[in-house]
Image (tube, grey):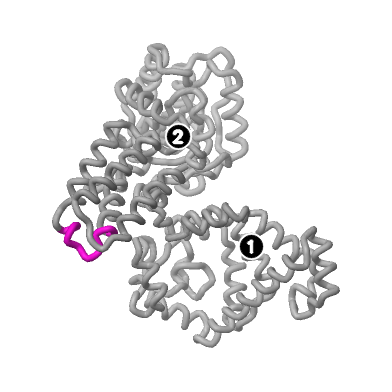
Amino acid sequence: MFDNLSDRLGNVFDRLKGRGALSENDVREAMREIRIALLEADVALPVVRRFIDAVTEKAIGQDVLKSVTPGQQVVKIVDDELVAMLGGGEGADPKDRELNFAAKPPVVIMMVGLQGSGKTTTTAKLGKLLKEKHGKKAMMASLDVNRPAAQEQLKVLGEQVEVATLPIVEGQQPVDIACRAMESAKLQSADVLLLDTAGRLHVDEALMAEMKAIAGVSAPTEVLLVVDSLTGQDAVNVAQSFTGEVPLTGVVLTRMDGDARGGAALSMRYVTGKPIKFAGTGEKLDAIEAFDPKRVAGRILGMGDVVSLVEKAAETIKADEAEALAKKMAKGQFDLEDLRMQLKQMQSMGGLGMLAGMLPGMKKAKAAMAASSMDDKVLVHMDAIIGSMTPKERKNPALMNAKRKKRVAAGSGTDVQTVNKVLKMHQEMGRAMKQIKKMGGLKGLGALFGKGGMGAAMPGLGGSGGAAGGLPGMGGGKGPGVDMNTLPPDLQDMLKKK
């Protein structure tokens, strides 16, 4: 979504960093380019003006212009203001972005928005999230009597995510359905009741009157405005219309995985004055994540999002597999079965493109991958090559002679050259495992990263924290964090770059 904006900002920053000293004119010229980049990204004009004024005021201060690294300072100022624009600036309470459950059960969450913004799917995603991550007993009810099969859609989605839905009664009106849903949720001892309201193609009086009537009988604790990120500038007008009529408590942005210009996401917090609580990141029913301004700003500025990467690893990597691999690594062993397992984990985490987008400084690497037509099919081809080998060959790659390579290439639909590349990749990784063994195994590797150790960051690497704890020093880990002085100089430089 933010690719064009990221590229434009990246070019501006590269020019600023390339200069030893900055004048006020240099900064103002850079700000003009950033203004154009934001406007092209469909960010609302008042938001752009406020953002540019704030950045310019700080960037032409003496602290920046006389700094040893003025270019880096400007990048930091832009990053800070971007975080503030998205709702994570100084004074912002992260708890405001969390759902409020401090009410007598059932806590009512009312979903509002225009038709086609993704309310029904988002309702099901939230139901699944509340059940699996918050341990809440949720119930869903569709109040949409206008759109054909809208109630059936929620019923089917409810069955898929295993969340109860209110039985459909033909001909019942939205307010009556809301009253019945409240009674049913109480009888079933539900913790949370999700109300999926009707939408329209545009905001009208009838829609607003219906929203007010439903809010009147259900007394919702949360009223979430669901906005399609692809609607661009018009999303701002929709947000303003709903803000004036319904007591909104937050915003959910859908289709954040799309190729829109991202203006809606950047404008929404400023226009509504309400926090963006969730972002829909795909079609699947688990593709929803809590919105974090710092992480989104990091992705826009090409700084990566290591915390999300670690969280995704925690969800997809099986602890027992990681434990078994850790034991083999400690002995300096690494066969093609292990490599295959690693490739499958990369695929389940979203593939090469997604991983590259989350790693700091990988923006250019991602572009190079795209230019060379290297995509996730590479992982599929590699898996096919390993799958075409016999179990004996996978355990002992040294058996692979010319004849066997030809057979594997034919079986996987590739060529001998590609088979050789996979074998070479395995050799390199095997060599790395032996180096780890020489360093004293995983404990020696952990010592590099301070007392927190890699064990606190990844499951099965000698720690009990598990990946959900996050990398030490990145906000989630319990360890004291990485000791920069113990790292190799190249790695130190990479981690210091903003």
Q: Would you identify the image quadrant in which residue 338 lies?
A: bottom right
Q: Which sits in the foreground, 479 or 7?
A: 7
Q: Residue at x 35, y 20 (%)?
A: 216
Residue that badge 2 annotates:
229
Read off the magenta span. Answer: 63-72
Residue 130 coordinates in the image, percent (x, y) = 47, 43
Q: Residue at x 36, y 41 (%)?
A: 37
Residue 55 coordinates in the image, percent (x, y) = 23, 46
Callout 1: SS: helix
Q: Residue at x 53, y 44 (%)?
A: 287
* Residue 343 circle label: 1
Residue 261 coordinates in the image, percent (x, y) = 44, 37
* Residue 27 circle label: none
Whether residue 12 is in magenta: the answer is no
Q: Main secondary structure of the magenta part?
A: helix
Q: Earlier in the sequence, mark 1 or mark 2?
A: 2
Rendered position, 193 above or below 85: above
Whether residue 64 is in magenta: the answer is yes
Local packing at callout 2 (Cα closer than 10 Å; few below 14, some 14-19, many 20+) is many
Instruction: Report whether residue 202 is seen.
Output: yes
Rendered position, 316 above or below 186: below
Instruction: Report whether residue 250 is seen.
Output: no
Q: Residue at x 22, y 57 (%)?
A: 22
